Image (tube, rainbow, N blue to C red):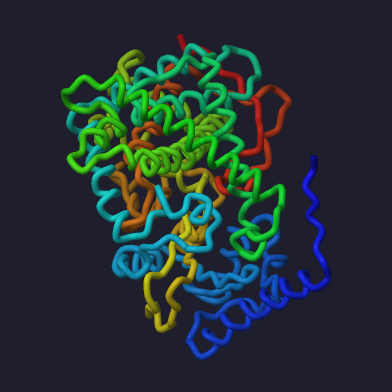
Amino acid sequence: MAADFTFSWFEVLLFVLAGYLLIYGRFFRNRHINLPPGPKGWPVIGSLLQCGKQVPIKFHEWSQIYGDVFSVKLGTELVVVLGSHDAIKEAFVKKSESFAERPKRWSLSIATKNKGITTPWPEWKHTRKFIVRTFRELGAGKQVMEERVCAESDILVEYIVNNKPTDLTRVIYNAVSNVLCSELFGTRFRYDDDDFKILMKTMSLNVSAITDANILTFFPLLWYLPTSLKSKFLALQSALASYVENRIKECRQAMHGGDPDSVAEAFLQRDDWDDGKIGDLAQIGKGLLNAGADTTASVLMWAILYLAMNPEIQEKCYSEIAHVVGDEAHVRMRNRSKLPYIEATCLEIYRCSTVSPLGVPHGTTTDVDLYGYRIPEDTMVLGSLWSVHMDEKMWPSPREFKPERFLDANGEVVNRERVIPYGLGSRDCLGSELAKMEVLIFTTRLIQKFKFKLPSGCVAPPMHGKFEFVRHPHPYDVISEARH
């Protein structure tokens, strides 16, 4: 039987009054504080309507008007936006302790009950250190990560259809997700595995639900209403966490001693481990899957599109790869110093795609001064990576795809530190090193094996992309012509 969610006029009046008191209380607290300047919004909704559908572009416009640090009201939420590389570095690196939280009213923080990537900073600091060390040991130490990415790149090549216009999104997503599953659980899946298909569908729906749930962040009183948006978001979060938890339990049953070869095994072998922490580990794994798969897959889809649109750049990349490792051997991380044009191309892919245009929200741990302004405790702070990568002073003609902008007169790579696709500081992307490895190995393997072309008579998709939680390219078909 369907539930009856009707409300009396008295209940509606109480709800409106509570909202007014919340807004007024926060305004009263902040009105004497020297907040950064910003656009004047409307009561209750703030500047949400002014943002439109392409929020990062609007934020970039505002940063040019109000400066590198500005504030904006989104619904009832005060948001401070950092619109330059220097401002992001000043806040997230130099004053990292003051900007190290996740916002308490962020929908993901509420849905996960401050577990996983939304864990409060004092606890997350130690968890993060352990995860980063584990990834480093699996990568630089055992080279397990690199071998898995190379193997998956070869499987991906087998699934790509030759000489037929094809949308490669699904197989790219499968490959990237499989690498993450390998690192998290120590096993990969066949692309046609029913369990794997369920995981892929759940992850895809989760990304969309996270985007839709932003309204809950900016109007937190909506959490108290029985909306379908809220119930769908929570159900998908729970489904993915349950999937990860079951995989962790399987890892525990299969353990037979020895050095761990996955993140789950490393946690299960910790001296302070107990089974009560499986839920916490599941939230960490869920966060890595949510954040890692969609972002890296989107980078690769942008990479293929830019290569197809710029055949001369694609051929320069192929020539350099062939000269250094040939047509069959995989490009390895140790080869990067001998592949300056490849590195420049990857940097330009990161810059032009900017798949995480506003990064992941930070929250202030205390009242903090930044650039002469006072930012209150528990304020949401966004680093506008889009503004960093589209800064016309740093990148002339920023919308053009030009790898040469990262090469000096001697062909050496420059300005790599100005590209920050995974953010900066203590709350940057946990899996950034794995993601960089995937982008390098997958991209070079695909260039070795295929020449990518847009179908004859077809125009490129709109290059502004789709701004969601992750910036995706619009769907497109590409012809993958085998080189040998």
Left or right: 89 with respect to 189? left
Q: Which quadrant of the figure has residue 63?
A: bottom right
Q: Looking at the picture, how far across and down is residue 385, in whole percent?
A: 47, 56
Residue 304 higher or lower than 402, as above or below: above
Residue at 77% from the left image edge and 75% from the top image edge: 13
- In the picture, measured across the screen, residue 366 lies left or right of residue 311, that is left
- Across and down, in percent, residue 245 comes to 42, 33
In-image side of 447 versus 185 (left or right)? right
Image height check: is 148 above or below 465?
above
- Residue 318 visible to an observer of this rendering: yes
Q: Is residue 76 above or below residue 226?
A: below
The quadrant of the picture occupied by the C terminus is top left
Counting from the top left corner in percent of width and height, residue 15 is at: 71, 71
Q: Nearer the viewer, residue 77 or 147?
A: 77
Q: Is residue 345 visible?
A: no
Q: Which residue is at a point 77% across and 47% down the rendered structure image?
A: 3
Q: Residue at x 68, y 37 (%)?
A: 461
Front residue (pair 377, 243): 243
Q: Residue furthest bottom?
A: 32
Residue most toward the front?
Answer: 1
The N terminus, quarter of image: top right
Q: Quadrant of residue 9?
A: bottom right
Which quadrant of the structure image shows residue 250?
A: top left
Residue 199, percent across and down? Answer: 53, 27
